[in-house]
Amino acid sequence: MPKFIVNYVKVVDYLSTKIGRMAMYLIFVMIGVLLLNSFTRNIINFPLSWGIEMAQFTITAYYILGGPYSMQLDSHVRMDLLYSRFSPKNQARLDCFTAIFLVTYLIFLLIGSISSTAYAIEYDQHKFSQWNPSMIPIKVIMVIGIFLMLLQSISTFFKDLAKAKGIELA
């Protein structure tokens, strides 16, 4: 494989690892928010208007930013009816084929998320609720996560292409 592809795979895998490992800790933030919400609602009878929504935003950031890392580790859910019966080379060939559809989907998703984020920024979009939080931060996180997933999908494609050719890339 050309050196720029090898370097691309290394850089993207490094980014996915670092961001994914940071995102793993968001689960503890979400648990803390939910515990605080439960405590204030049930113990001191002072419900927080922002607790549940903040937990939703946190878990959204958790799975959007953790997706590329999950893909890098090959720990995502796979529908496996025939796939496991194929040889590793044929699995890699099939993954290269399906990566075309995944990358196409992610490109459209990225275009839509950029458009949605631009709308949120232009009109100062807020969630219609009692807390009324701005939607800009979660939409920016959405764009970043989809972009990272696109980069990781391309990296995975290159690794599968190398495996299909009998070369170990990374």
Image (cartoon, rainbow, N blue to C red):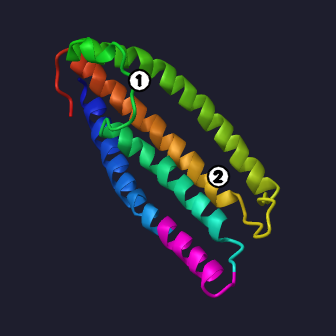
92, above or below 120, in the image: above
Secondary structure found at label 1: loop
116, above or below 34, in the image: above
Res 49 quadrant in image: bottom right
At label 2, the amino acid type is Lys
Secondary structure found at label 2: helix
Q: In this view, does 103 lie to the left or right of 113?
A: left
Instruction: Please give the range of residues in magenta.
Output: 30-46
Residue 110 location, x and y as percent?
Answer: 60, 37
How crowded is the residue under tag 1: few (<14 C-alpha within 10 Å), some, or many (20+)?
few
* Residue that numbered label 1 is attached to: 79
Q: Residue 139 — which label?
A: 2
What kind of secondary structure does the magenta stretch mostly adopt? helix
Residue lying furthest bottom: 44
Residue at image coords 68%, 71% = 50
| Callout in the foreground (2, 1) | 1
Q: Quadrant of the N terminus?
A: top left
Residue 135 location, x and y as percent?
Answer: 71, 58
2 or 169: nearer the viewer: 169
Residue at image coords 17%, 21% = 167
